[in-house]
Image (tube, rainbow, N blue to C red):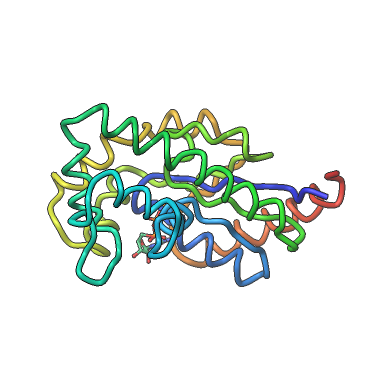
Amino acid sequence: MKPLIIGLTGGIGSGKTTVANAFAAKGIQQVDADLVARQVVAPGSPALQQIVAHFGADILQSDGALNRAALRQRIFSQPAEKDWLNALLHPIIRQQMQAELATATSSYVLFVAPLLLENQLQSYIDRLLVVDVTEQNQIARTLLRDGGSEQEVAAIMAAQVSRQQRLAAADDVIDNNAGPEQLAAQVDALHQRYLKLAAKHS
Ligand code: ADP
């Protein structure tokens, strides 16, 4: 039986990882879209072999892992190369995400995808949980975590859907503007709600 799948998304620095960890502490399994995207091109994978055959061995780092910066550069101004790469990777990534979601054994499963809406992955999930913070908090927390400049964070935010678009798509919202205790209370309440929904899910 396919488990109930809760999509978890939010902008950069909103608190997705923090929220996902809180659900994990309750024994809820998760599938991380970014992790899957990295795993399918791990050393030894068929996809990486095809990338090397296409772009040449200098697309690899000296340790044999994919040089993502070099790959980004190669496809940046070449739409045909980007299309080739997407045609190769998207089906593999989607198949792997689906396989992992389908075999989860916890009462429900979280599908953590920062770009869930941007990449139109709604068909994978039963409900969407959005972690929401003000843009000021988003910028301040990202700078505190990653360093860098406010302009860099603003550029990443500009490439993501807006706060309003995310909220409009949400079934459930965690307001993460306050501190860890308020966050924990919201996760507790949602967990109880999801357990009830999972019991009815077939
Ligand atoms: P995301 O995964 O969405 O990018 P993170 O979970 O990494 O976001 O959170 C961004 C940063 O903000 C992290 O350093 C995290 O520890 C911090 N953080 C998360 N929630 C709160 C909160 N309620 N109050 C203060 N800092 C927070």
Left or right, 200 with respect to 40, comes to right
How many tags in the picture?
A: 0
Q: Quadrant of ligand 1?
A: bottom left
Give above or below for 200 relative to 49.
Answer: above
> Residue 178 location in percent, x, y?
43, 57
Give above or below for 199 relative to 44.
Answer: above
Query: In what quadrant of the picture does the C terminus appear?
Result: top right
Q: Nearer the viewer, residue 64 or 16?
A: 64
> Residue 150 location in percent, x, y?
15, 49
Q: Nearer the viewer, residue 182 or 141?
A: 141
Left or right, 88 with respect to 144, comes to right
Residue at 50 percent across and 31 percent down: it is 120
Q: Nearer the viewer, residue 174 or 73?
A: 73
> Residue 1 location in percent, x, y?
83, 50
Left or right, 10 with respect to 153, comes to right
Residue at 51 percent across and 39 percent down: it is 91
Give above or below for 94 relative to 193.
Answer: above
Residue at 45 percent across and 34 percent down: it is 119
Q: Nearer the viewer, residue 3 or 139?
A: 3
Image quadrant in which you'd find residue 163: top left
> Residue 109 location in percent, x, y?
67, 55
Residue at 25 percent across and 54 percent down: it is 68
